[in-house]
Amino acid sequence: MKKLIPLVLLFVAATALAKELPYQVRTVDPEKTYGYFVGDQIHRTIEIDVKEPYALSKGSVPLTGTRVNGIELRRVEMSQRQQGEWTHYKLDFVYQIFSRGDQAWLTQLPRPRLIVTAGKRQLAVESPEWKFEVSPLASSSGNDIGKVERAFRTPLQVEAWPWGLGLMASFAMIIGAMIGLIYIHADKAWFPGMGGPFARGYRHLSSLSEQHSSLGDAVTAIHQAFRQTYGENLLPDNLDNFLASHPSFHAIRSEIEQFFTSANFVLYGVTSVGAHGSFSELQEFCRLCRDCERGVA
C-alpha cells in the first residue's frame, strides 16, 4: 500500500500538470497508411494553440532538407493568427520518401521537437507519431507479392462525386451558353422578350428578298416597330424622350439618327442614300434594334 501512494500522487500531479499545459496540439494526417513508394510525397499538418505569454519558437521548426530514416523534409510553411489570449500556429509539412527495400516495411514520419517559450521558460511540444507502410518498386526476393501484402489493406477507392459534379457543372454551362446564343440570335419567338416589335420586324425583313423588295418596305417595317415600342410615331424631335423611356437603345443613338435621315430620303423618292441606303443595311439596323429590345446589345 505504501508503494502505491507515491504512484497515485505522481499520477495526480501529472494529470494536473497536463491540464495546465499552455498549448494544445492537433494533427491532420493523410487518410491512407499504405501504398507509398520511393519518391512519393506526404503532406502533414500540425496545428498548435499556444496560450499567452508563451509563443512558438521559430528556431525549433525543422529546416527543409532535414532527413530522418530516409524521409526528407521538402517544404514547410507556417502561418499564425491571434484568437484572444491564444495564438494559433499552423505548420504544413511536405515529406518525400527516399528509403527503399525489397519488401514492404513500416516506418513513420519524423516528429519535430517544437518548443514554446515564455521568457526563459521553455516547454517541448511533442507531436503524435504517424506510421505508414512503404512498398517496394519491385521485389527481388522471388516471394509471392500476396505474402507481402498486409491483412488490413483494402482496394483503393476513387471518389466519383467530384468528377460527376464537374461534369454536371460543365453540362449546365454548355446548356446556359446555348440558351444565351439562341436568345441573342434566334428569330423565332420561343422565349419571353423574343417576340417584340423589332423581333417581328426583323423576321419580316428576313422573309423578304432584297431583289424583290423596295427600301420603302424596310423603312415602313422599322417605323412600325418604333411606333409599337414607343406607343406613337417616333420622330427626331422626340428621340430623347424615347431613349429616356427605353435606355437600352442609347448604344445605337447615332444609328437611329442616321436611320431618320435615310428614311426621309427613301420615303420622298430618293433611292440612293447614305448609311442605311441598301436593303441589307436596313435589315442589319433592324437587327441592332432587336438586340437592344432584348437587352443584349
Image (tube, rainbow, N blue to C red):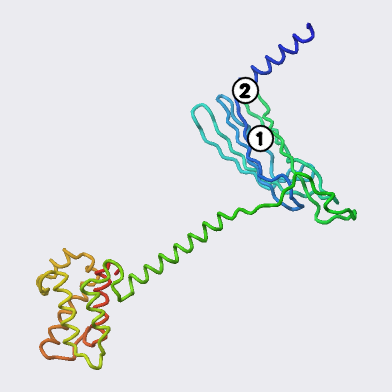
Residue 232 located left or right of residue 202: left
In the rendered image, residue 264, in percent from the top left (x then y), is placed at 12, 83
Three-letter residue code for mark 1: Gly
Which numbered dot is residue 21?
2
Q: Amino acid at mark 2?
A: Leu
**Mark 1 = which residue?**
59
The answer to which of 192 and 170 lies nearer the viewer is 192
Q: Is residue 120 above or below residue 131?
A: above
Name the residue furthest bottom: 211
Q: Nearer the viewer, residue 244 or 289?
A: 289
| Near-viewer residue (113 or 235) | 235
Q: Earlier in the sequence, mark 2 or mark 1?
A: 2
Tell me the quarter of the image containing the N terminus. top right
Q: CA distance from mark 2 to mark 1?
A: 21 Å
Residue name at image x 78 percent, y 42 percent: 107
Camera-side residue of 285 and 192: 192
